[in-house]
Image (spheres, rainbow, N blue to C red):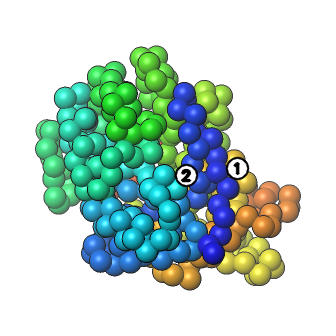
Amino acid sequence: MGVLVPKVSLGGSSGNTMPVIGMGTCSYPPVGSEATKAAIIEAIRAGYRHFDTAFIYGSEHPLGEAIAEALRLGLVESRDELHITTKLWCSSAQRHKVVPAIKTSLKNLQLDYVDLYIIHWPIGLTQDVTQPPVPREYIFPLDVKSVWEGMEECRNLGLTKAIGVSNFSINRLQELLAVAKIPPAVNQVEMNPFWKQKELRQFCNEKGIHFTAYSPLGANGTMWGDNRVVENDVLEEIAKARGKTTAQVALRWVYEQEVSLVAKSFNKERMKENLQIFDWSLTEEESNKIGRLPERKGVKLATSFGSHDIVLELDAEI
């Protein structure tokens, strides 16, 4: 029997719940479909029921295969036991492309619906680009009103239970809330002990938007992350004193900020360790030490899109 993960209520008018820890499926460098599928099946055995994917990750198909296999093996009794999030990529961020995009993702996932569909970035691309950087002429500002109408249609059609956003700043959320008939249930943004997002979290809380942290461990080993979390002296010292791993201390701190989180590990032991954060807590002194760590943003869209004006402006906001 795997770890029983607590659930959180999603924001907006969805009335849905979501396991507080999700397993991320974005690999850099990519590991291939079979390795991804095998890791997801191991994660289900360990107790994960929330999986985070995106069209651009290339992991929708192996996630769909893993879900089908888990059902065959009896690891879960029904698809309803799982929470699946996927994301609208920038090249589909136009009103007429949104519903076809979620239908493509559902086909990849072999599912009738997802639990959460979110806008990946508040920016659009006229076409897909396989190698960075993206030519400036391919990038355009997101028309929030019309794209959100497409997201609302996805929910009204029953293709997703809830809709949300990712990488949205306070200003962009305000712009969205001014036009939304269905408010966003979630804002998924980079957050960890070095990028605490206090103001954005407070705003989301006031507006009833659930906050999900991605890269809670600093995305070590990727082109956008580094080891600032997992090899930090303060976190290591706390971990050693408590008989925990540095990752567990970082994840527990994120969890104690009353947000949900998406952590990616395809290592069997580490994925289990990442779930073992619910039967202990940080002391006030430990939390204060972590709270004093210097702020340092990790994820920058300019890394893959290029240092264009519209991209740098977005990076500066969140």
Residue 247 makes an appearance in the image? no
For residue 257, which numbered disc appears in the image? 1
In the foreground, 93 or 236: 93
- What percent of the width, then of the height, locates residue 310? 30, 37
Q: Are dots 1 and 2 in contact, CB under 8 Å?
A: yes
Q: Secondary structure at mark 1?
A: loop
Q: Residue at 53% of width from left, 74% of height from top?
A: 45
For residue 40, which numbered disc appears in the image? none
Left/right placement of residue 171 relative to residue 120 reads right
Which quadrant would residue 282 be assigned to in this image? bottom right
Q: Is residue 258 above or below residue 148?
A: below
Q: Residue at 49% of width from left, 45% of height from top?
A: 188
In the foreground, 261 or 35: 35
Pointer 2 residue: 213
Q: Is residue 189 above or below residue 159?
A: below
Which quadrant would residue 11 be assigned to in this image? top right
Alpha-carbon span between mark 1 and mark 2: 10 Å
Within 10 angstroms of label 2, few (less than 14), some, or many (20 or more) residues?
Answer: many
Q: Secondary structure at mark 2?
A: strand
Q: Earlier in the sequence, mark 1 or mark 2?
A: 2
In the foreground, 91 or 236: 91
Left/right placement of residue 301 relative to residue 213 reads left
- What percent of the width, then of the height, locates residue 264? 48, 67
Of the 4 image quadrants, the one containing the N terminus is: bottom right
Which quadrant would residue 168 be assigned to in this image? top left
Q: Residue at 43% of width from left, 20% of height from top?
A: 180
Q: Residue at 65% of width from left, 61% of height from top?
A: 5
- What percent of the width, then of the height, locates residue 96? 19, 29
The amino acid marked with disc number 2 is Ala
